[in-house]
Image (cartoon, rainbow, N blue to C red):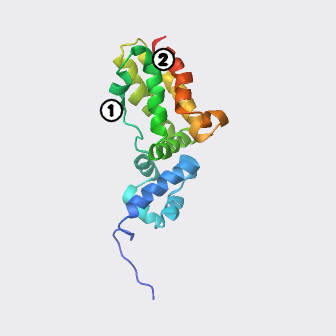
């Protein structure tokens, strides 16, 4: 005769929450928001799907938790703005690329990029981060007219770069050094900000 566990928290080890979060990052990164499911995330974490719901609620809640913000614009903007104004574009590109070269940032960033192109839930996260949290802060800090449009133009450039380098892994862009990409793309970003 089977015994009922009764109500309460589903069973899981003490590290279950961390395992679920790590599994969610991997699943969303590989499958995008629409393709990942609570069941697939639970299976990857080796827990019951009820435990995923217990810790995180809905798939949207789990996505928000897993996505986090991979970069810290509040710290980056003063650094980007330090130094000569005619090199701001290069510093923006360098900051984003050097950040994405770190494993943890790249994993979460790729997850956001994939989710942005595969679902309505992911697109505002990435667009909001690039435009509002980083680039419009730079544009506003410099007192440029039409800062939001300028930030959006830069976001399109940076978003395209991140997509081709880290998601599509497009040949020479994926293989290029950070310095080479900064030298080639920085002037375009500079023109968008100040041209």
Tell me what residue is drawn at x 55 percent, y 53 percent: 36
- Provide residue 40's location: percent of width, then percent of height: 54, 60
Tell me what residue is drawn at x 53 percent, y 23 percent: 183
- Provide residue 76's location: percent of width, then percent of height: 36, 30
Q: Quadrant of the N terminus?
A: bottom left
Describe residue 74's horizontal placement relative to residue 168 as left or right. left
Tell me what residue is drawn at x 49 percent, y 34 percent: 97
Tell me what residue is drawn at x 47 percent, y 23 percent: 90
- Provide residue 158's location: percent of width, then percent of height: 52, 28
**Residue furthest toward the right?**
171
Residue 129 location, quadrant: top left
Describe residue 182's horizontal placement relative to residue 74 as left or right. right
Mark 2 neighbour density, 10 Å: few (under 14) some (14–19) many (20 or more): many
Q: Secondary structure at mark 1?
A: helix
Relative to residue 108, is residue 87 depicted above or below? above
Camera-nearest residue between 186 and 110: 186
Q: Which residue is mark 1?
A: 75
Q: Secondary structure at mark 2?
A: helix
Q: Disc number at residue 190?
A: 2
Relative to residue 114, is residue 141 depicted above or below? above
Q: Report the Cα–Cα distance between label 2 and label 1.
A: 20 Å
Q: Do the residues under discs 2 and 1 have CB atoms within 8 angstroms?
A: no
Q: Disc number at residue 22?
A: none
Relative to residue 61, is residue 116 depicted above or below? above
Q: Is residue 125 visible?
A: no
| First in residue order: circle 2 vs circle 1 | 1
Question: How many marks on residues?
Answer: 2
Mark 1 neighbour density, 10 Å: few (under 14) some (14–19) many (20 or more): few
- Provide residue 2's location: percent of width, then percent of height: 45, 85
Relative to residue 145, is residue 138 depicted above or below? below
């Amino acid at each position: 005769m089977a015994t009922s566990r009764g109500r309460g928290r589903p069973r899981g080890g003490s590290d279950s929450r961390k395992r679920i979060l790590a599994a969610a990052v991997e699943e969303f990164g590989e499958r995008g928001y629409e393709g990942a499911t609570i069941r697939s995330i639970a299976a990857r974490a080796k827990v019951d799907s009820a435990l995923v719901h217990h810790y995180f609620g809905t798939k949207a809640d789990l996505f928000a938790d897993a996505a986090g913000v991979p970069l810290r614009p509040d710290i980056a903007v003063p650094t980007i703005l330090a130094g000569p104004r005619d090199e701001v574009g290069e510093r923006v590109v360098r900051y984003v690329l050097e950040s994405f070269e770190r494993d943890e940032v790249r994993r979460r960033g790729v997850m956001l990029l994939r989710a942005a192109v595969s679902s309505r839930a992911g697109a505002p996260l990435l667009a909001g981060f690039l435009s509002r949290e980083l680039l419009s802060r730079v544009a506003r800090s410099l007192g440029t007219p039409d800062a939001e449009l300028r930030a959006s133009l830069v976001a399109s450039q940076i978003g395209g770069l991140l997509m081709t380098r880290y998601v599509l892994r497009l040949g020479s862009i994926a293989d290029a050094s950070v310095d080479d990409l900064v030298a080639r793309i920085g002037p375009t970003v500079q023109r968008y900000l100040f041209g």
